[in-house]
Image (tube, rainbow, N blue to C red):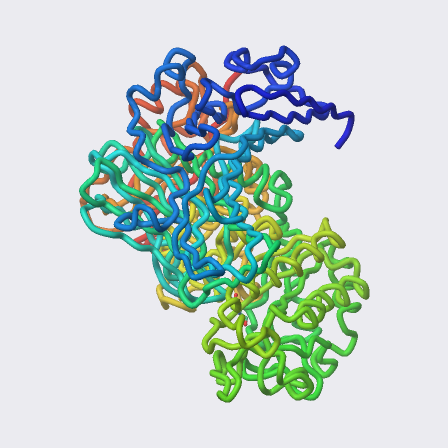
Amino acid sequence: MNHYFKKQFLTTGICLTIFASGISQVAWAETKHLATNKTAAIALQAEKISSDDIHIFTTHTSLVLSAPIGGELKYVYYGDRLHAADLRNIESVANMDHAAYPVYGMNCPKESALAVTHADGNMTLQMEVVTVNTTKDNNTTLTTIALKDKVYPFYVNVYYKVYDDADVMETWTDITHKEKKNVVLNQFASGYLPIRRGNVWLSHLYGSWANEGKLAQEPLKPGVKVIQNKDGIRNSHTSHAEVMFSLNGKPQENVGEVIGAALCYGGNYKLRIDTDDSEYHQFYAGIDEAHSAYHLKKGETFTTPALALSYSNEGLSGCSRNFHRWARAHKLAHGHTLRKILLNSWEGVYFDINEAGMDQMMGDIASMGGELFVMDDGWFGNKYPRKSDNSSLGDWVVDTRKLPGGIGKLIQDATKHGIKFGIWIEPEMANTTSELYEKHPDWIIKAPQRDPVLGRGGTQVVLDLSNPKVQDFVFNIVDTLMTNYPQIDYIKWDANMSIMNHGSSYLSAANQSHLYIEYHRGLEKVCQRVREKYPNLTIQACASGGGRANYGILPYFDEFWVSDNTDALQRVYMQWGTSYFFPAIAMASHISAAPNHQTFRTIPLKYRIDVAMSGRLGMEIQPKNMTTEEKELCRKAIADYKMIRPIVQLGDIYRLVSPYDKLGVASLMYTTPEKDKAVFYWWKTEHFCNQHLPRVKMAGLNPEKTYRITELNRIDNQPLSFEGKAFSGAFLMANGLEIPYNHKVAYHKQNDYSSRVLYLEEVK
Ligand code: DGJ
């Protein structure tokens, strides 16, 4: 920490420890409540507002907790930033029945966040506040509330972290004890939030392989709603660890109060909402405790993953913008660095890798203006060459029969074409047909006495990352590649199997239930080592498509592959849902072939481009099968994408018309924070003669500014009637533009699809 100073003072048992290091924030008015003037100057984002209450805040949101020393830690308020007067009297209007971190044993009918069995068999907890401590470090304020059991030497620290530059709070806990023997943790959620009943709706994502990120919206009804993942490896195919609560009825994109929550964890999770006879929905989120009872040793600390909370009074899109800003600034590798436009070899050649083919693809993407080529699966294996998905994972040596010049030659070719080179690996896995498995059969996940359950290709198995030797092996895959070929710019890190059979040869018999947790601790350790040594490498998280879109894994990755389904129409739905929590800069979105390889649907190139351009643009196609005209359209699109890339990748999203509303069209836009530029997307989702589509009102513009409209990726033989014309932000947001339902193209080029991308630039 640079030039920091530390000040401590005690006021009725509350201890504030303040670190400041070259901080230049605006001092919050409310910090005047604090006891010294030095504290005001360093813009602490937490303050004591009465002898018991703590106010933790971001620019637009407040969380109030009651933390009386010797008493119970309670939740008081979460929502819009409170004024000083409201803060003084908030307790008088709050429901004070909610423990901020409910524990099991003395209020058994209610669900709990933490439940344990003490060393002596006692199953109850009764926690009291010992200290409240707030520290400031660079741009974060961390509030730590230390709790101790009234009787047992059992301790929980509840943390709340806020950032100066994001309307997101993170909460998690540390659990430890000094009891004579192990304490068993039976439930260990990261956080809890009561949500006042009313007409509260839940938005969450569900799906499957090739159908990820689907949006579900439902009113919360009496009973229990559980969103859970038990895959072990890939936790975002069938459900997501992120949800939004719309507090004023049916969810709306640009108005209404919304609370968003994202569990930052790469493994199994459980989100649970209890709607009982009380006035509140009760939301718990954390690691799924099923089959994961944790035996906590004396002195050991169990840290739960962070639960990120956000609140917005600007609807679902407002909440998404909060998550996106926080993600770019804090939860994504290189969140402020523009991503390269790439061609990935997978759908172009699948396993059919060879030197001439790679060179041709590199030449083609370079000629269209691309900046990176990624060689996908199929390049490795010596004794067992990787010809299909049934062998070789674990044997990370180049197959010189396919690539005689090795990776060195490929890098030379990329350099010749003026682009960068990237490579695919699936480091956490092996096939039973591999030299690795022959040498280390005990490195895979499986129960003793049982045959391994085999996955993809009939031979795939998962390596046991709880084992430090396996962690070293996985790290060395990246380290060896990068040491030998430091020019490698990008790694696609895939993971294509679930934990099917519970068991580890490394973990003790008593601790077999730690497997899921230790796997992810092991993975995280490897990722940390990779990032420490290779901070500039771009890494994509892929897991059979979109299986790893979560904020547990993303701090080590730059982006994720949204889905193995590249069908542009289905992508409209999947990318819409995924954008609820994840910014466009992280959403890999590729132009692929027609008919599509997953849906077999034939969608015109213009539409495929227009959809891919709303995320992190790439291509996943065999360019040698494209016509000169198609290549030219892509070349122009890539050039235009380079112009709008900062708006899409770093801008603010406003979702306008949802494909899930089945109005025949979907539309969204991105604006710069300065609101001087924007990109508007419009995709027809149904195709009928003389149908009626809504005129789409824009959002997120400055009503006072005037914007000139330019259509991108134009295929029509005449410009749009408003091409080059300027309109006020007020008009565009109140009325919108009439978008023609079809394209004016030659008869033989007519088809049933229609889409538009409009670039808006302020006229100064
Ligand atoms: C699954 C990924 O999602 C695909 O993109 C591709 O990389 C294959 N694995 C390769 O086996």
Residue 750: x %, y % from top left: 33, 53
Counting from the top left corner in percent of width and height, residue 40 is at: 60, 14
Residue 332 in percent (x, y) is at 58, 45
Asked whether the viewer can see residue 51, the reply is yes
Quarter the N terminus occupies: top right
Q: Is residue 237 left or right of residue 395?
A: left
Pick the front one: 610 or 315: 315
At horizontal 23% and vertical 46% (from top left) the residue drawn is 218
| Residue occupying image coordinates x 63% and y 55% | 539
Q: Is residue 310 left or right of residue 426?
A: left
In this rendering, is residue 704 above or below 94?
above
Q: Which residue is at 58% across, 15% downward?
A: 27
Farthest right residue?
484
Placement of 714 over or under 398, stated as above or below: above
Q: Is residue 551 visible?
A: no
Viewer-side residue, 193 vs 72? 72
Total marks drawn? 0
Observer-nearest of 664 and 317:
317
Residue 674 locus on image (x, y percent)? 53, 23
The answer to which of 601 and 751 lies nearer the viewer is 601
Left or right: 744 in relation to 276: right
Q: Is 2 situated above or below 207? A: above
